[in-house]
Image (tube, grey):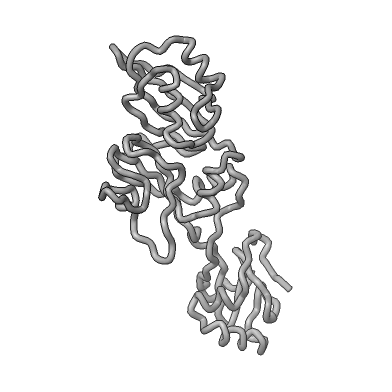
Amino acid sequence: MTRSGAGADSGRERLQKIMAAAGLGSRRAVEKRIKSGEVRVNGSVATVGDTAATGDLIEMDGQGWKVNRAKPKHRCLVYNKPDGEVTTRSDPQGRPTVFDRMPPLRGQRWIAVGRLDINTTGLLIMTTDGELAHALMHPSNNVDREYACRVRGPVPPEALKNLLEGVVLDDGEAQFSDIVESGGSGENQWFHVTILEGRNREVRRLWASQGITVSRLKRVRYGAVFLPKRLRMGQFSELDVRDYTVLREDVGLGSPEAELVLRKLKSGKRRR
């Protein structure tokens, strides 16, 4: 049997787990208190096996606690990758990696979403959420990536037409889903291109198929996440819970998993 408050969400955890994590005793000790009828959930006597969710009221020994949702168990941040860093965890040539810049973790590890080659800069999503990382990179989800490209020399209209319609590379057909001219001077022209997959050096190879060389390449967007304008090279910023949730929902995942915690209530506020 489960008991929940009117405002509870679907995320539930066993009562003894929540209470033990809040320091109200070991799981075994809490379970014993539940068996003896000393614990109430939303005014009703709890039984072993009951669960609780956000908004529920737990009472024991004349004290009350409200169940709250803590920060998500996983983290997700945006990193502005500089030139010269690789996106592997270690490099046999001793080159710096993006993982060198990441904040330390306990019991988790950072995952780079959609690798960037050593000469490509810009947006790199880093997360400890393996489910999210897999979904963002899986071709079936059609998560688009936008790049700012500086190319050398003239770009004939026919070349742009070919790149939008699709060309055959050595690993199969590829194309840009969108191309937007964005200025430039002299021999250098800037374009913003969008692609729906992330094969190795695919953007550069697409331009090369038309005899055009990319001199600078920067990723500025991955799905709904944009590279913040104020984020300097080599710096990162953490996504807030709202943006992290939107990112998961965009690829068909639910709200991020988060631990439930207890907030002790003042006397007189226990009953609703």
Residue 219 percent location from the top left of the image: 40, 33
Judging depth in this view, the residue of 128 and 171 nearest the camera is 171
Q: Residue placed at 61% from the left, 69% from the top?
A: 13
Seen at 68% across and 61% down, the residue is: 6
Residue 236 percent coordinates (x, y)? 35, 46
Q: For this view, does 114 lie left or right of residue 98?
A: right
Relative to residue 1, is residue 10 drawn left or right? left
In the orientation shown, which residue stands out farthest toward the left? 94
Quadrant where the C terminus is found in the figure: bottom right
- Tally the marks: 0
Task: Answer above or below: position of 85 versus 74.
Answer: above
* Direction right: furthest residue: 1
Q: Nearer the viewer, residue 195 or 9?
A: 195
Q: Nearer the viewer, residue 40 or 97?
A: 97
Q: Which image quadrant: the N terminus?
A: bottom right
Q: Is residue 165 above or below residue 16?
A: above
Residue drawn at 36 percent across, 29 percent down: 217
* Residue 3 higher or lower than 138, as above or below: below
The spot of residue 141 in percent (x, y) is 60, 40
**Location of residue 46 by image quarter:** bottom right
What residue is rendered at 31% in x and 17% in y?
Answer: 188
Residue 122 position (above or below residue 235): above
Q: Nearer the viewer, residue 247 or 11?
A: 247
Tell whether 199 sits left or right of 135: left
Q: Residue 5, position in %: x, y?
A: 66, 65
